[in-house]
Amino acid sequence: MSRPTQHNSKSNVPSLHELKGIFQASGLKNKILFTIIAILIYRLGVQIPIWGVVPGALEKYLGGLGGLLNMFSGGALGSLSVLALGIGPYITSSIIMQLMTVVIPRLEEMQKEEGEQGRKKLSQITRYGTVILAVLQGSLIIRLIAGSSANLLPGVDPTMFWIAGIVSLTAGAVFALWLAEIITEKGIGNGGSLLIFIGILASVPTYVEKTRVMVAGDNSKIFLLLILLAIFLALIALIIILQEAARNVFVVNAKRQIGNKVYGGQNTHIPFKINPAGVMPIIFAFAVMAFPATVFQMSTPLPDTWLYDVKNIYDQYFGFSGSLYGVVMFVMVIFFSFFYASIIPSMQPKEIAENLKKYGASIPGIKPGKPTAEKLEEILTRIIWIGAFALAGITLAASSAPILLKIPTLAGLGATSLIILVGVALDTVNQIRVHLLSRQYQGFMK
């Protein structure tokens, strides 16, 4: 944890002239250009289909959650491109690894006590898991396509298609993982979130056109569409408020005399975000909900088998239009909000209390050490509950509104994707702002 932020009456927002100089001097321009180039490369890969498949062969099998997965991939799944799996296997592998750190003490020790080296080991294990999941998911997709000769181009050998298809999809998932990590490291923003963001953005025109065709000439549907758009705008405003809201915990620095100078003694604060996990709880919850649906859809269980019965039950209750889908998503978003917050370094009460004590700072009226950690734990628990319920409520409202208003073509844009679009955009803007301000502070230090 860095030292608590000190209040400063002077504005930290640079003028337009200063902004231009800071932008060039800080290397931010190179980061943004690198991110743009990486995204263009990714979108180019989306246009490359795997060998031997009829264009659009997979689209007819996609519906419900499968359609949303296709939207997240920017149409790569429907066109069965080499990047059809995208970063889905990596997200699933990350969820499994983070859950395992809670269950397996050795993994928890690697994450919390071995520092950067331990996190690198966990990242490497997550990559291995990504490859395994990519092979499994790729096998299911290839099995579905190879089940009908009409899905293959004339003269294509099914065995070779199996081999080439699984290798291509696995390589594409690994490439997407590598690209996401290198964007995070050398570009601007979170690479994985940005790739999903670009995929959704690429699909928006298609959904808008479908909605236009559906409501054309029907005044009642036009009115309902206007209501839906108003709801979307209100939800966007709520998402922005939720992403930017923070609880400031005030602390006081003890006065220290070094030579003839006295340091400290000023009021500072530690800002704790109401929604520290951003859009990750939504992405994780959706990934968990979509995984079994994808398995069922791609494996095509035969009638009169127990797997077929399980699939029907899952579709009835937990599918995108299932009676319990909204409730389960609501609960899972709350769960992952707490879970993700528990692994964020800046949200660890014990570490924060130790750092405050180290800097000679304390919360007014609270003793340093354990009492401070307990007080911070109480504060963090309260604000995470508020943020988790707000995020889950927005998710439920966004997914329910298109269904209740019977504008189904916007259902995908109204739920998870809407929150991801706004959340990732805000996160990226905030990171750009941090780069600009850090350069400004470096200027003050010289």
Image (cartoon, grey):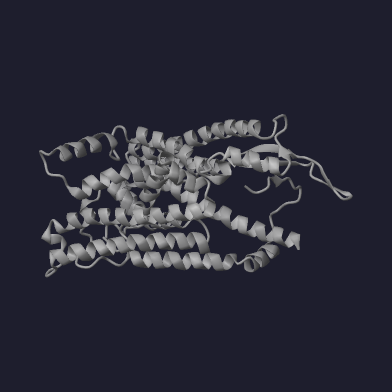
Whole-percent x, y for residue 437 in the image: 66, 57
Instruction: Indicate left or right for 41 with 61 as reference.
Output: right
Figure quadrant of the C terminus: bottom right
Q: Nearer the viewer, residue 380 or 325?
A: 380
At x 78% / y 40%, what residue is drawn? 254
Residue 200 in sight from this viewpoint = no
Above or below, 44 against 437 in this view is: below
Of residue 165 and residue 436, the one placed in the foreground of this image is 165
Tell me which corner region of the image, top left, top right, bottom left or bottom right, holds residue 86.
Answer: bottom left
Residue at 70% x, 43% y is 358
Q: Nearer the viewer, residue 313 or 371?
A: 371
User: Residue 154, percent across and down?
Assistant: 12, 69
Report if residue 5 is visible in the image.
yes
Quarter of the image for residue 25 reads bottom right
Residue 3 vertical position relative to residue 391 in the rendered view, above or below: below
Residue 243 placed where, x, y %? 54, 44
Q: Is residue 143 above or below residue 340?
A: below
